[in-house]
Amino acid sequence: MANSNNKLKLNKRNAHKQFLIDDFKLEESWRIFKIIGEFVEAIDIIHDIGPAVSIFGSSRTRPDSPYYKKAEKIAALMVKNNYAVITGGGGGIMEAANKGAAEAGGVSVGLNITLPFEQMPNPYSSVKLQFNYFFIRKVMFVKYASAYIIMPGGFGTLDELFEAVTLIQTHRIKPLPVIMVGRDYWQGLIEWIKDRLVSEKNVSPHDLDIIQLIDEPEDILKAIKNNSHNS
């Protein structure tokens, strides 16, 4: 009788392992609502900003850097041509772009992310949002962008660059200009892509057409406007 009871208890324990849906903990279920809420809040706030460009680059770039000054100039030029400017809301290039947009009198959006080593939002965003989830923030960058402008940066900047290229390559989003600024900085990466990825047929040669390497702010604006006319 004791053996039968033990077998019954064991079978019940094993049966529960089949019901994977039961493995969701209560706090994990509630997280879904937090994710939905973060999406809804972001869309509600920035859905009507109009044409915009998303500008990426290192948070470590100092105000005396030529790249900082160029990001300011690019952002101001975008605003003067009726584009809002979206950044990650932090320091460095993000601060420079928000500053350029704000001082030119335009819409300056900062999509800040909560990190363990706190990323402090810069003071130049006229529209500020705070995100807990990287993937929601990424959707906002691409959803409202007429172009991606990639200034010199690190892993985070590369992440945004290659995600945009992948989404365009796989036809998950409409083609938009992905413009890399800083020929001296990015040329080695472009050459590596040609020498390794293209030569070994891991990407097609025409996939490189997604990326444009442009240094002058006026030429960047022209590329963005040409794309909007052709789309």
Image (cartoon, helix red, strand yellow):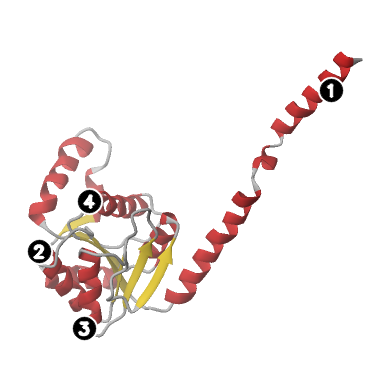
Identify the amino acid type marked 3.
Ala
Q: Which mark is residue 65?
A: 2
Q: Nearer the viewer, mark 4 or mark 1?
A: 1
Q: Is residue 58 above or below residue 97?
A: above
* Nearer-the-camera pick, 122 or 80: 122
Q: Earlier in the sequence, mark 4 or mark 3?
A: 3
Residue 24 horizontal/vertical position (percent): 64, 44
Find numbered disc 4 in the image and state the secondary structure of the residue it sits on: loop
Label 1 CA crowd tier, 10 Å (few <14, some 14–19, many 20+):
few
Q: Which residue is mark 1?
A: 8
Residue 78 in sight here? no
Measured from the top left, where is residue 123 in percent x and y? 28, 75
**Among numbered discs 3 and 1, the one appearing first in the sequence:** 1
Mark 3 or 1, closer to the camera: 1
Disc marking residue 104: 3
Q: Which residue is mark 4?
A: 154
The Cα atoms of the two marked residues, 2 and 1, are separated by 72 Å
Q: Is the C-beta separation of discs 3 and 1 under 8 Å?
A: no
**Residue 168 vs residue 74, the one in the foreground:** 74
Mark 2 and mark 3: span between their CA atoms? Answer: 20 Å
Q: Earlier in the sequence, mark 2 or mark 1?
A: 1
Q: Is residue 58 left or right of residue 184?
A: right
Query: Mark 3 or mark 2, which is nearer the start of the sequence?
Result: 2
| Quarter of the figure that contains the N terminus | top right
C-alpha span from label 4 to label 3: 27 Å
Disc 2 packing (10 Å; few <14; some 14–19; many ≥20): few
Which three-letter amino acid code belongs to the residue tagged 1? Leu
Find the distance from the CA under tag 4 to the CA under tag 1.
57 Å
